[in-house]
Every structure is written in structure tokens, then in C-alpha cells.
Image (tube, coloured by chain):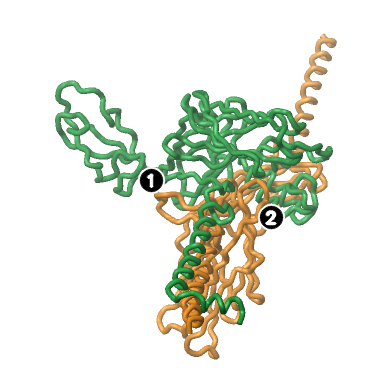
Amino acid sequence: MTFFKKSFLAIRSQTLAKVCLGLTISFLLVVVWLLAFSPRLGGASNISTSIQVISVSVCGNDIVETGEDCDGSSLNNQSCETLGYAGGVLSCHTNCTFNVSACRSGPPLPAGPGSEAPPPAATETIVILKGMAYPEAVITVLRNGQAALVVSADKEGGFEAEILGLSAGLHHFGLWAKDSEGRRSISFSFSVTVLPQVITRVQNILVPPTIELNKDSLQKGDVLRVFGQATPNSQVFFYIEPSVLEGQVRADSAGQWAYSLDTAGLAEAPYQVKAKTVLENGLNSTFSSLALFSLEAVPEEEITEYCQRADLNGDGKVDLVDFSILLYWWGRDNACSDQNNDGKVDLLDLSIMMYWWTG
Amino acid sequence: MLQERFTNYCKGRVLFILLMCFFCLPQMTKAAVFYFEGAGQYHQGDIFIVQLRMDPEGECINAVEAHLSFPPELLAVQGLGIGQSLISFWPQEPQFSNEEGMVSFTGGIPGGYCGELAGNPGRTNLLLNLALHVKESPTLEGLSGGRLLFLPSSRALLNDGLGTIAHLDLQDFPFSVLPVFSGERKDEWQDLLKSDTTPPEPFEVVIKQDKTLFNGKFFLIFSTTDRQSGLDFYQVKEGASPWRGAASPYVLEEQDVRGIIKVRAVDKAGNERIATAVPLAGGKTIYWLAGLVIIAIIGSIGAKRWLKKSS
């Protein structure tokens, strides 16, 4: 009789059930642990992607949404009296701000919301993009991959961009910013369904931080300094990969942030660094562009620096001209257009170009 | 007896756990999804539209390559609409073969696509509108059907600057074919085209020259979109020459670049938009003008001196 059979016979039936139950629970705990902690399975340590929570509101749908005082006949339970007036009839402008022109003033009151002169009626299809970048950053707005508008952020990093004369339908918008030192952020984009003759507001846009390294090639023991600019007083989370370090620093009131790393303990290898901004209210940006450094000797390459960031013609932009150059070399080998150096210009190189796109 | 009870008791439990893991683990692994959307039942003779969509499922995707197949004995492609597509740039525009039952395309999304925005009054994840004609066949009786499939060669890439290929879940689209409808036949493609009365978006034409491209010849770069039925084709007209079919980048036939250059973008519904380029900065015209100015200046100085000498 085998050992297993002897074991079976030696155990009472109730104990058998308990053993089985114990095995079941153990297995379930392992599965839960894998779910919670395995990056591969979408656990907490997955840092491949950081998604922004951008929201869209439509002015003209009779629903008061984020960023609107009112919408059509919906006044958000407000009246002239609640706005500090003696009486009258409150209504809503076509840009979803209160119209207090029919409110009756009593004794002098402090200026309330909607007390400014009524804005012009919205007869056009308008998209308003609103968010946070860096103090006095210059922000380029892309539409369908091409530069459409340039606006400046205020001293706190807030910006608002108004795009007029659009046709209704699906539009793809992108944004990138230039900070006070002339560094460019990564461009990131989002798609919006634009309805005709209404104002569509896209808010909670948070421009990723800029990032720069003091050196891109270091000896072991050198200090690597990672720095850039972000939204003032935000937390900047940075990641040095592969699997080296993740941490956070606070951007100062001018949005400047920095971190210093002693490379003595690192292996000789290529590394990449990226960062994201997180505001006090929990909103987070997408990741910044990658900053690359190496602790090993890198052979001299013929490829110029700008080719490595998909700027194939070296004009400081990644736009339609660079895409045309990529198309020219499509399926063939070209040192500049072959962004991942695999010997041919193909979909992978297109992906890298789309990442560095500036419009 | 005891062994049998143990075996049966545990068998049920283990089987339950294995089944749970089999169905749950794929959900736990992040993967973008390519899928079709359509009614699912079509009458012979109808033309219907199936939408190809993508859900990034928590990732950001910036490049896609799709290959799909359809049963050519049942269906034929009637049209391909990219008007509402989230793809902005097309290294390979959608192509099809009705003989082989294949459709393929490659496209890029600057900055990547990360999913729907909260509150957006519509859907933004369309890759392509595929218009299919259901063939009429007297041999098809009763209900028949087939599947639209994404082939395993389809790919999506992450917007991470590294060319990383995303995990991809490809979902089939089963459909049924019903006998010919006795009433009016459906033509969703024509309905889409008739509703489009808006020309393509305004655009610019740029004249470029690069010694490393096209043997240093002058070429044009242009791009626009049509947000309704989608772009159909471009044409170029150089000076007095006739309109010619074109794609960007386009090498100019007349390399002296003297005449006005026009590019016409036409959408699937026939609406058109024309952009014009006047070759001053990029062509030889400026050298001609500069030469004329110099000759005029020299001539006037010379004439002045001669007149002075004479007097």
C-alpha cells in the first residue's frame, strides 16, 4: 500500500474536508497576492503608464457640469438672492456663466459672481482647454497633430486656451509646454467630441514636468542630478529605471524641482529617468519625456543627437516634415529615421516619433 | 470509500479554482483590445458599416498596424471611412482585397491615445469605418454567416518612446446573413456620404528641398483631415499643368518651381478644399527676381553716371 493511501486511511473524513478547505484558501490568497503586488498583472507597482483624469463638460446641454455656473435652464439651485442681490430673475449666458442683468440690487453689496458685463453670445463652436503648467510657460496647442494656438500660463502656472471656428465632430488635441529655461515637455493628447454651436470645456489638464540631467554619460560615483520644472508646490514623482529608484520631491513656488543621486551603487548600464506631477487634490499628470543616461562607455555614433528624438531634419521640431522623411525611408534602412536602430524604418520607429511629436 | 469521498470533494474545489483563474487571469493582465462593432445580422444585398475600435485598457497607444480578414464569398468591401478615426497619420492608408478578403492599415497617433475622457459626449476610439456589401447568392438559403477577424499580425505600440509592443486582445465579430429583404435595401455607406456636406479642414502646402531626399529635388508636404466621411484623395496642379493624383511627400514635376502650386483635398463624399503655395522662398523664382533687381540697380547707377559725364 502506497504512503499516500496509508495517509488517506489514517485521516478522518472531517479532517480531510478541513485540509481541502485549507488548500483552497491558500491558493486564493496566492492569487490575491499576485493581483495586489505583481506589476505584470496590473498591481500597484506598474509604472509603465500614468493616466490623467481630464474631464469634458459641454455648455449647452442643460446640465451643469464641472467648470460651469449654470447651463441653459439649469441654474444649479441659484437665484438672484443667493448671489447677493435683493431680487429679480437670474438666467444663464450661452457661455454658462450667470446672467445677473435682471437681478435687482438692494443696498450696496460686494461684487458677486456674474457681475461683470455679459459676454458675447456663443454662436460659434468653441473648445476651451484649461489646466496647469509651469509659471509663465509657453504652451503650444495641437489640433489633429498640427500646431493650432500658442498661449502663456500665468504666474501660478494656470492656463486657458480658446479654440474657435471648429467643425463639429471628433477632434484630437495635444499640448506641450516650454518652461522658463527653454526646456520642452513631452506632448500628450486627448480626443474630444465637439458638438456644434456649444462651448466644450476640457479641464483638469496637467502638463507633465520638464526633465533634464546634468550629464548623460557618467562614471560610477558621479552625482547624477535630475531637475526640471513642474506646477508650483506640486509633488514630483520620479522613476529611475530599470528598477533603480523611485521617489518624490516637492516643486518650489517657482515650480523648480531637483534630485541628486550618488551613482556609486549602480551597475554599469544604460538608464532612463521619467517623472510625473501630482497635485494636492490628487490629480496627476502623464509621465514626462524620458531622460537617458549611461554609466558605461558609449561608442561614438554617427547619429546626431537630434535624430535620437525623432527630429529627423534637425529643425527643433517633430512635425509633418519629419513624418514625411520617415515615410520616405519606410521599409528601408536609414541611420536617422531608424529610431530604434533595428535596421529598418517601420512601425516601431513611427511609435517613437509619435511620442516625441511637437507639431 | 474514504479515498473516493476525498477525491470527489477536492476535485470539485480544484476545478472551481482552475476555472476561476482561467477566466480571471486574462482580465488581470492589462491588454489593449481591438474589436468590431455592428448590428450582427444583415440581409443579402445590404451595405452595412462595421466599426473597428480600440480600447487601450489603461495603456496609451500611439501606433497601430491592423490586418483583418472577412469571408470574400459572403462580403465585399464597399468603402473605407477614416473621417472619425483617432489615427492622425497614415504610413499605410487602409487598403483592401475583395479577392483575398483582407483589409490592412498602419497609423500613428501623436501623443498617444489613452482612452475616453470623463464627460465626453461621444466616443473617440474609432479606428475605421468599414462598409461591406453582403453578396447575393441564390445558393445561400436560410441563415448563414461568418466572422470578421483581426489577424495575429495586428499590433499596437505603447506611447513610451521605446517602441514597446502592447499586449493586444483581438476580438472576432460573428455575423449572420439573412435572405434578401423584400423591402428597401439598406445602404449605410451612401447614407454616411450623403450626410457629409463639409469640405476637408483648411491646410497649408510646404515646398521643401533636402539634399538627402529625392536626390535633392523640390518636393511638397501637405496634410489635412476630413472629420465626416474621411479623406479620399489628393491632387496637385503645378502652374498650367493638369491636376495629377498625389500623396505627401510629392516630388514636383517642374523642378524650376516657377508656377503657382495648388493641392486639392477631396473627401469620400466629393467635397473639396484647395490650398495654394506660391514658390517664392523655396524655388528659383526668388533668384530670378533678385537678379532682376540687381540688374535694375546696376543699370540705374550706370545710367546716372553716364548722364553726369555727358552733362
The structure residue drawn at horizontal position 54% and vertical position 42%, both measured from the top left corner, is A286
Q: Is mark 1 on a helix, strand or loop?
A: strand
Q: Which chain carries label 1?
A: A
The structure residue drawn at horizontal position 48% and vertical position 67%, both measured from the top left corner, is A24
In the image, A57 versus B183, the foreground residue is A57
Q: Which chain is orange?
A: B
Q: Which mark is residue A200?
A: none
Q: Please name the residue that numbered disc 2 is placed on.
A: A347
Q: Position of residue B26 (x, y in %)?
A: 54, 64
Q: Mark 2 lies on which chain?
A: A
Q: What element carries label 2?
A: helix
Say whether residue B309 is left or right of residue B30. right
In the image, A76 versus B163, the foreground residue is B163
Is the C-beta separation of discs 1 and 2 under 8 Å? no
In the image, B137 versus A206, the foreground residue is A206
Real-space CA distance between mark 1 and mark 2, rounded to the nearest whole angstrom: 35 Å
Check if mark 1 and mark 2 are on a common chain. Answer: yes
Q: Please name the residue that numbered disc 1 is placed on.
A: A57
Q: The green chain is which one?
A: A
Q: In this view, does B311 lie above or below B143?
A: above
